[in-house]
Image (cartoon, rainbow, N blue to C red):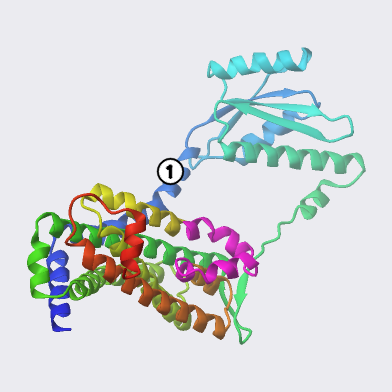
Amino acid sequence: MKKILVIARWEYVERVKSKMFLVSLLLMPLLMLSMGILPGMFAGGEDSGTRVIGVIDLYGNLTIPFADRLQHTYMNEDGNALYVVRPLTALEHVDLETARQEADAIVRTHEIDGYCLFIARSLGGILLEYRSNNPTDFHTAGRIEETVRSIVFEQTLARVGLKPQIAEELKSSVTVRTSHISGDGTPEMGFLDMFFSAYVFLMMLFFMILSSGQLLVRSVIEEKSNRIVELLVSSCSSTELMAGKVLGLSGLGFTQMAVWGLIGLLLSATLDVPPVQAGDALLFVLYFILGYLLYAAIFIGVGSPASTEQEAQQLTGYLVFILVVPLVLTIPAIQHPDATWISVLTYFPLLTPTMMALRLSIGSPSLWEILLTVAIMLVSIYGAMVAAGRIFRIAILSTGKRPGLGEILRWARGE
């Protein structure tokens, strides 16, 4: 144990003093904060200019109310209209396809930013078609749709003799707020808060495993290429060397997580975001540690036979796909928390920490499920560490041709 601690201390101290570690310690929170703030800043700046919207009204009596409402409803900070409506009345007297072609030509010359085509349906109602050079301008398309929908609604009420004031009452908005109910019946965090806490857990685990796992493999490869490993194993066993590396680099990763967690707590307090409950927070930390240790064993077991960083990246790259799976499944899992496939994936060790983090955020797994998944993780970690130790013991001194998958599996079985 003394030798393991010496190796762990050296691995930790040498890397925690490096400039790269100090930069990454602050760079990652800044990047994540920028990812949350910059899109909103850019999205907020999109309404600074005025767009010219053409109108071809084949429905009838929509152009004037549409122009008036669109221009007076949406304003920028200076009080200027965001949209100016230009009626294309000449195109209302030609066939539909010709009207489209001529209007498209006007858009391509940038005289207008886009145009609306109002077409009356044979069974009643209206078909709205918005055509522009930027089909992903969802804000403009949504505002046009909402404006036309409200005008047609009011005109329909007027035809049946109802007052415009009734239209305003019928359009009263309803605000829905969802929240999770705890076991004692008291409301807890809202849906977005729970989703955010689960997503942050997944992202932190992803980045820590990716960075620390690659660092662990790179450390082994450097010592193999410099022949330092031969001196190390003359002073300690391969098991002690591997345990020391895992322990030291795990401490490095947990230092990162502690700093990032502290920054997150400060930000949540500043932004008035409800914190995760203490019981769930402890389970998050537990699954975080178990998940990291499992992946660390797999990384060192898969990466130690490699002779170059390119080989190691190729071998460990497949593990990244497994880490991405929970990120892809976040929305479906939150929408269907009781689905059978979620329970099945929960008991797959490589996905257990992340799937349990999702389930803790969207519900309360039973005690037996928590105990069972923790037992599965402990058994898996033990098996992965034993297999990784057997591979590591042979791989660190092997040179020449890279062993195949079958040979690595035989090493893991101790054959």
Towards the viewer: 221 or 265: 221
Is 75 placed above or below 291 here? above
Is residue 11 rendered to the left or right of residue 44?
left
Residue at position x 19%, y 58% from top?
A: 398
Query: Residue 312, image x and y in percent?
Result: 27, 53
Nearer to me, 368 or 175: 368
| Observer-nearest of 76 and 182 | 182
Q: Of all residues shown, which one is farthest toward the front? A: 415
Residue holding disc 1: 42
Taking the image as drawn, is residue 410 in sight? yes
Question: What range of the chain is rendered magenta?
Answer: 325-354
Which amino acid type corresponds to the residue marked 1 in the rendered image?
Phe
Relative to 25, does residue 373 appear above or below in the rendering?
below
x 46%, y 80%: residue: 374
Q: Residue at x 47, y 83 (%)?
A: 279
- In the rendered image, residue 144, in percent from the top left (x then y), is placed at 66, 36
User: Does residue 342 appear to the left or right of 43 in the view shown?
Assistant: right
